[in-house]
Amino acid sequence: MMMVNDIVTVGNTALLGLPKSAYFCSERFQPSAVFASYDWAKQMRSEKHCVISGFQSRIESDVLEILLRENSPVILVLARSIYRKIPVEYQSAVDKGNMLILSPFPAGVYRVNSKTSYKRNCWIMQNTDNIVIGSLTSGGNLERAVKTTGKNPTILADADNL
């Protein structure tokens, strides 16, 4: 475990210096977002482009799985305190130097909720080069984070009219 500017990290901190693309997807999504997101992830994987995300929603977690299959560089930002022990599914990627896990939250924040997810998403948006959103639900926390940070993301599919 290491501290970098009040951020607790585990893994390869050199990944913070790479150009990064953030990826998000609302929990409610258009079916078209699934394949668009998977195709985007495969492109990032083939280019070995670093992707940063909370990888929390179902599609985000699928994107992480795609990236980790080929040792792509990824930064997982938690919406809680740093893990006490690295989860088994991430250990290999951390050991190979392909993954950084970080938390912008102090020790003692163990429950992920809409407030910590919102803060985490804003942190990611402020610390990335560009933002890609698989699907965006109007009025959701993800849309609020985009508006708060003033960022202009690429949206693969709109979740309205579900």
Image (tube, rainbow, N blue to C red):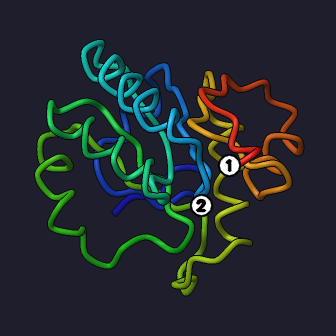
Residue 130's image quarter?
top right
Identify the amino acid type marked 1. Answer: Trp
- Image coordinates of residue 137 in percent, x first then y, are 74, 49
Q: Which residue is mark 1?
A: 123
Position of the N terminus by quadrant: bottom left
Question: Residue at 50% across / 74% down in the picture?
Answer: 81
* Mark 2 or 1, nearer chain start: 2
Identify the amino acid type marked 2. Answer: Pro
Position above or below: 15 against 147 = above
- Image coordinates of residue 64 in percent, x first then y, are 33, 44
Question: Residue at 17% across / 33% down in the picture?
Answer: 71
Residue 98's image quarter?
top left
Question: Residue at 51% across / 61% down in the picture?
Answer: 103
Position above or below: 26 against 52 = below
Which tag is nearer the camera, tag 2 or tag 1?
A: 1
Question: Residue at 70% across / 35% down in the picture?
Answer: 158
Q: Which residue is mark 2?
A: 104
* Nearest to the observer: residue 139 or residue 126: 139
CA–CA distance in space, label 2 to label 1? 8 Å
Cβ atoms under marks 2 and 1 closer than 8 Å: yes
In the rendered structure, the answer to whether residue 43 lies left or right of residue 152 reads: left
- Image coordinates of residue 147 in percent, x first then y, are 88, 41
Is disc 1 placed on a helix, strand or loop? helix
